[in-house]
Amino acid sequence: MRDRLNMQEEHLEELNGWDEEVKVEVQEMVQETLENVAERNSQLESVVDILQRELKDLRAKVCAARTEGGHEVVACLEVRLEVPKPKEFRGKRDAKEIDNFLWGLKQYFKAIGINTDDRRITAASMYLGDIALLWWRRWCDDRLGGVLNKAALAKPKDKSKGWADKGKQPRDKDSGDGKPQSKWKGKSTWKRKPSSNKEDKSKSCFLCDGPHWVRDCLKRFKLVAIASEEE
């Protein structure tokens, strides 16, 4: 019994020794962990300080750009994609082909970032061919001609350099008989041509030698009436 008791006492002493060793090791591990956490905290603080400084510098640059350019400067990263170009449309009268062509143009413009209508129309005309391109050229020419005609009609006409106002135009003074008196004092070189008697001679009647045709002669009517009575 004594031997067993002695052995148990020895085991207890060993356990007590191990307990102290474990405590020391645990304390060392905790201390090491705390030191690592503190070091990482200091590193994070330094990184945060650097980021704050860079953010402050960026804000200053943005404010300077706004004051100089008058608009906001937005920095964005765009991923450039290789977008396939739409197929050329040659004016084939097929509803399915037209719908596919228009849908392909919309997707192409959306992918490359064309948002304005003017740029879309200009880019779409580059993918027309054959009959469609010919129609587009005629339409553009007709539209340009109409614009030029409207501009010509809208342009004010030049007025005469004489009298600008009607109220300033000179009026002929009336003479005593109510007729306007002309201010022209020169001699007129215009002369009336004498009328030719060719027409009068051609119209002479052989019954009465009058200046009219035979069919209009009164004697002819009388002769016709007498002849009808005799019959």
Image (tube, rainbow, N blue to C red):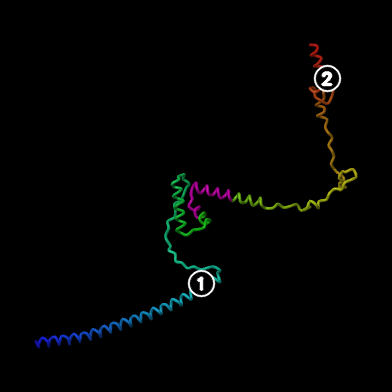
Residue 125 magenta: yes
Q: Residues within 10 Å of mark 2 (few under 14, many from 20)?
A: few
Nearest the viewer among 42 and 180 is: 42
What is the x, y in percent for residue 173?
87, 48
Compared across the picture, whether 115 is left or right of 222 comes to left
**Residue linked to disc 1:** 62
Q: Secondary structure at mark 1?
A: helix
* Residue at the extreme top of the image, as rendered: 231
Residue extent of the magenta highlight: 123-143
**Splitting the image into 4 quarters, where does residue 215 fall?**
top right
* Residue at the extreme front of the image, as rendered: 1
As measured in the structure, the alpha-carbon distance from the residue carrying label 2 to the one carrying label 1 is 117 Å
**Residue linked to disc 2:** 219
The total number of labels drawn is 2
Nearest the viewer among 193 and 152 is: 152
What is the x, y in percent for residue 61?
51, 73
Nearest the viewer among 44 and 95 is: 44
